[in-house]
């Protein structure tokens, strides 16, 4: 059972790493400049263990407390990325274990994230999530492009947070390239003020090539490594 799962994950991982390498070469980029975050949400802690043994260093989760429970059960030395919507009343707890929060999309999250990081005596790197959907889709996470600067200022000013860059999810069913290009332009603009905000988190199982072409530094990939999620997730 475990041996078969290890085989599946090794195969998925090799395939995704090859896709990243090819996309990077096509874009004239060094594949080493693209970090693969394997999104393990809904999959068991045993998969995280196997992935760590296969050399994965960056894992992503999208729900608390599932994320915390897997973090606590996992081997040391992994970098934990929280990529899902952050509820305000869970923000402090998330900052207690997440190394990077990709989904800071409103001002009200900044204080509780910083307080949670302070309580755990750590610094959490935060990305501003931008909603780049061409039409208002309702309920989609992310701040408006015009709000990025202000939110970035708040994160950068928070004692226990560090501004890492920006994140977006491409709109469902549309060509992702224009969205990722817009995100890259926003990232460039942000770096004029905050040179260390170098992270550009974009690209998932279905669109990682377009994200790498646009300059993604971090791709967040679940299904292409782990298989289909049991319950939609
Ligand atoms: C689930 C999730 C991913 C991974 O999606 P896949 O299609 O499984 O690759 C990436 N980013 C976010 C924010 C997610 O919630």
Image (cartoon, helix red, strand yellow):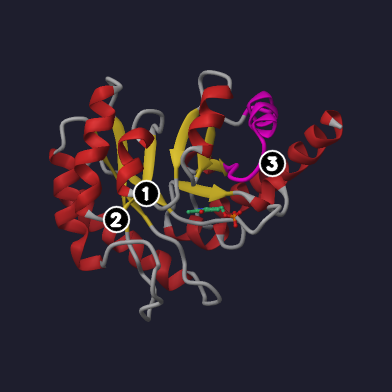
44 part of magenta stretch: yes
Q: Which of marks 3 and 2 is nearer the N terminus?
A: 3
Q: Determine which residue is flagged by label 1.
A: 86
**12 left or right, relative to 72:** right
The residue segment tinted magenta is: 39-55
Secondary element type, mark 2: loop
Image quadrant of ligand 1 equals bottom right
Callouts 1 and 2 close, C-beta under 8 Å: yes
**130 left or right, relative to 26:** left
Along the line of sight, which residue is nearer the eye, 18 or 51? 51
Q: Where is residue 34 in the image (x, y as percent from the top left)?
A: 49, 44
Q: Earlier in the sequence, mark 3 or mark 1?
A: 3
Q: Position of residue 126 (x, y in %)?
A: 30, 42
Classed neighbour count for the residue bearing mark 2: other residues with Cα under 10 Å, few (<14), some (14–19), many (≥20): many
Residue placed furthest toward the front: 89
* Residue 17 location, quadrant: top right
Residue placed furthest toward the bottom: 135
**169 left or right, relative to 190:** right
- Quadrant placement of the C terminus: bottom right
Residue 140 vertical position relative to residue 167 in the rendered view, above or below? below
- Mark 3 or 2: the one toward you: 2
- Res. 165 in view: no
Classed neighbour count for the residue bearing mark 3: other residues with Cα under 10 Å, few (<14), some (14–19), many (≥20): many
Residue 140 vertical position relative to residue 65 in the rendered view, above or below? below
Q: Determine which residue is flagged by label 3.
A: 13
Along the line of sight, which residue is nearer the eye, 221 or 177? 221
Q: Position of residue 121 (x, y in %)?
A: 27, 20
Mark 3 → mark 2, Cα distance in angstroms: 30 Å
Can you tell me whether the CB of the residue at mark 3 lies under 8 Å from the nearest atom of ligand 1? Answer: no
Q: Determine which residue is flagged by label 2.
A: 105
Along the line of sight, which residue is nearer the eye, 31 or 205? 205
């Amino acid at each position: 059972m475990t041996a078969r799962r290890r085989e599946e994950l090794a195969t998925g991982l090799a395939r995704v790493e090859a896709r990243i390498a090819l996309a990077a070469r096509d874009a004239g980029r060094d594949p080493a400049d693209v970090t693969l975050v394997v999104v393990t949400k809904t999959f068991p802690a045993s998969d995280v263990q196997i992935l760590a043994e296969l050399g994965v260093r960056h894992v992503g989760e999208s729900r608390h407390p599932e994320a915390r429970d897997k973090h606590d059960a996992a081997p040391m030395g992994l970098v934990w990325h929280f990529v899902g919507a952050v509820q305000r009343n869970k923000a402090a707890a998330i900052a207690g274990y997440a190394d990077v929060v990709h989904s800071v999309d409103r001002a009200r999250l900044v204080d509780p994230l910083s307080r949670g990081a302070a309580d755990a005596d750590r610094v959490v790197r935060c990305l501003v999530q931008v909603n780049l959907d061409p039409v208002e889709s309702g309920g989609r996470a992310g701040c408006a492009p015009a709000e990025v600067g202000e939110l970035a200022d708040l994160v950068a000013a928070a004692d226990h947070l560090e501004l890492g860059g920006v994140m977006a999810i491409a709109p469902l069913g549309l060509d992702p390239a224009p969205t990722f290009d817009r995100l890259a332009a926003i990232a460039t603009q942000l770096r004029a003020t905050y040179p260390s905000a170098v992270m550009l988190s974009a690209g998932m199982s279905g669109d990682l090539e377009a994200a790498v072409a646009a300059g993604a530094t971090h791709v967040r990939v679940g299904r292409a490594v782990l298989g289909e999620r049991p319950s939609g997730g």
